[in-house]
Image: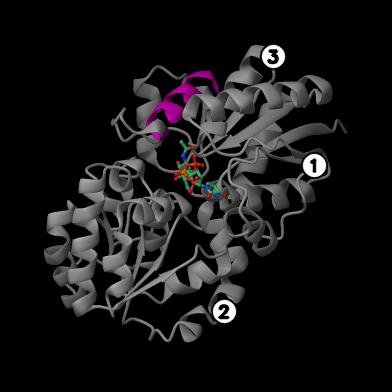
Amino acid sequence: MSTYSVHLIAAARPNFMKVAPLYHALSEAAEFQVALVHTGQHYDQNMSDAFFDDLRLPKPQFHLGVGSGTHAEQTGRTMIEYERVCVAEKPDCVIVVGDVNATAAVAMVCTKLGVPVVHLEAGLRSRDRSMPEEINRLVTDAVADLLWTPSPDGDENLLAEGVPPEKINRVGNIMLDSFELMRERIEAAETRQLLQLESGQYGIVTLHRPANVDPPEVLGVLVAQLVDTSVRLPLVFPVHPRTRARLDETGAGNALAAADGIQLIDPLGYVEFMNLVAGASVAITDSGGLQEETTYLGIPCITLRPNTERPITVSEGTNRLSTPDQLASHLADALSGNWPSGKRPELWDGKAARRCVDSLRKFLRG
Ligand code: UD1
């Protein structure tokens, strides 16, 4: 039996829960030798190592130490560092996930070296090119050799862009494999008790998109809305480092800190965070992953964005897009039960990693 060496690329927090189930599934299959490559885009203990521990990922075989910087710095450093590794190691194929800078950077390196590249979470489109992730998605999908999509809209987007159908394989949503792998530990975690939150009686907030947190006037409006909201519903808000920096620079964080109903906490590891999500009555977010996790769990999600690359969470799930000004009325609807209960999209079943392994096997055998 031939064996294939596979590099699996992880860079930033939302990548780790997509990489973990695939790493475990590939490691169990005799014909794959899988090496984990961490680009180092996220490096804080609670943005990276906590996820590796929670998701039982080993120390990466390669760590590129890219760190923070402008988009060009991050993308360029990732390309330079990964090219060295790729040339020396000659993997049979490379898997990139999601839509962060490393996803596009590594895909470009591989395609120019003639190394087959597979994109997990392909085909998602917000059609908003002011979003850095949209550029990363377009670039990655334009060069990938095998495109694993989470939902039918992904397939349709790729076909409309001229990707040959034989390159597209719908595998479902792998994030939910992580949830199912960790379900027992998530349910047993005591994050809610530690924060004195009653199940079903609080909202969870996450905000980190540059469009929401970088312009001080937008951040100011969002903070005012959250302070108002917290009078009706206790909120817990794990604060992303980008957001923490903007709250400190602008002084907007003072109003949040002073609000009795808001608990501002540091970012959490995967298990602790999902314990909070699973017990929340509503999520208020601009994250991509949380839109999917709340649809899976049947929890109302208010997404503070004008668009989403995950429209199935709106058409089939529990997600609604919102301007900051609409937050109060959406919240009233969510709390009064005037909200669709939603359903789990097809193939969001915790078994996506297996389908990826089957697909990769066929692809590499040619
Ligand atoms: C990145 C991704 C975004 C993803 C998000 C999840 C891109 C273009 N963006 O955005 O798609 O949703 O990760 O978090 O790839 N920082 C730390 N510690 C860390 C990492 C970052 O303090 O471990 C700080 C640094 O000041 C850094 C800033 O956060 O400059 C932003 O980090 P960066 O990785 O550039 O972008 P994110 O906003 O995290």
The magenta stretch is: 133-146
The three-letter amino acid code for the residue at tag 3 is Leu
Point out residue 57 in the picture as x, y percentages from the top left corner: 72, 55
Q: Is residue 177 above or below residue 170?
A: below
Q: CA distance from mark 3 to mark 1?
A: 21 Å
Residues at marks 3 and 2, CA–CA distance in whole angstroms: 45 Å
Q: Mark 2 or mark 1, which has the lower sequence index?
A: 1
**Where is residue 187, by image quadrant?**
bottom right
Task: Decide whether residue 17 is among the magenta residues.
Answer: no
Label 2 CA crowd tier, 10 Å (few <14, some 14–19, many 20+) = some
- Label 2 sits on a secondary structure element that is loop
The answer to whether residue 244 is left or right of residue 340 is: right
Residue 45 vs 118, above or below: the answer is below
Q: Is residue 321 visible?
A: no
The kind of residue tagged 2 is: Ala
Helix, strand or loop for disc 1 = loop
Vertical placement of residue 108 versus 352, above or below: above
- Label 3 element class: helix
Q: Which mark is residue 189?
A: 2
Q: Nearer the viewer, residue 321 or 224?
A: 224
Q: Which mark is residue 18?
A: none
Q: Nearer the viewer, residue 227 or 20?
A: 227
3 or 1: tag closer to the N-terminus: 1
The kind of secondary structure the magenta stretch mainly shows is helix
What residue lies at 42% left-to-right and 51% top-to-bottom? Answer: 245
Residue at image position (64%, 61%) is: 50
